[in-house]
Amino acid sequence: MVLFKVKFTFQKRVQLAQSLWRLCWLSILTGALTFALGIYLKCELKRRSEVMDNTDIHLVPNTLIFVGLLSMLINFGGVKICNDSLDLAKFPRWKGYVEPYLISASLFTFLMLFASLLSYFMRGNLDASLKIGLKNGIRFYKDTDTPGRCYQKRTIDHIQMEFQCCGNNNYRDWFEVQWISNRYLDFNNREVRE
């Protein structure tokens, strides 16, 4: 499957291999950055899991981690091919692998584009999950005695201090829910029951 047959002199082949070698290392660095971003996002989601609504939100960091690792692996192969193509004795060994490598690199480029678009479009799910989770967290803020919710009050306090916010719709969210624990209320009183 040859489109244009081109013959390179040794000097041109060296320049091409060096350029591709640099490009592969740049791709490895971007893959490492994507991987690190996925790890960071996953850690942040786990840290705030008490105020997140659903568990489907881990699709974004898992995709970033997978794509970052795959990018580093594919481009390490490209670096090896570029290095060995400079040596006339080693190049024939890689000659059969160049075409499958180019095909897999092209497919991976589309996978990377798909992962980027998926991450961008899933941003709304992350926002919605945090919004619903924060609303529920404010509603159950008073329930520090309930098993599974003992650290939720502390988590919400830390989020509000870290991001300098008071809920989804400013401070009004706190007035829409009862945030005083039921154990401190006298339900025999008619005004309290209302």
Image (cartoon, rainbow, N blue to C red):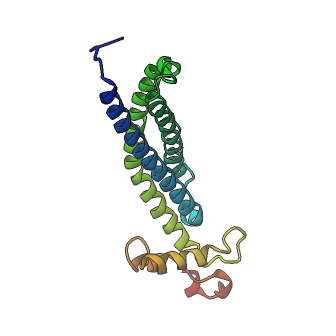
Most extreme residue toward the top is 1
| Residue 166 point in image, percent of width and height | 43, 78
Residue 53 in sight from this viewpoint: no
Q: Nearer the viewer, residue 146 or 122?
A: 122
Q: Residue at x 65, y 74 (%)?
A: 151
Q: Residue at x 48, y 40 (%)?
A: 71
| Residue 168 point in image, percent of width and height | 41, 70
Residue 155, image quadrant:
bottom right
| Residue 87 point in image, percent of width and height | 47, 28
Q: Nearer the viewer, residue 177 or 121?
A: 121
Residue 11, image quadrant:
top left
Q: Nearer the viewer, residue 59 or 31?
A: 31
109 shown above or below 171: above
Q: Residue at x 39, y 53 (%)?
A: 124
143 shown above or below 185: above
14 shown above or below 135: above
Residue 15 in sight from this viewpoint: yes
Q: Nearer the viewer, residue 83 or 37?
A: 83
Location of the N terminus by quadrant is top left
127 shown above or below 177: above
Q: Residue at x 42, y 40 (%)?
A: 24
Q: How many marks?
A: 0
Location of the C terminus by quadrant is bottom right
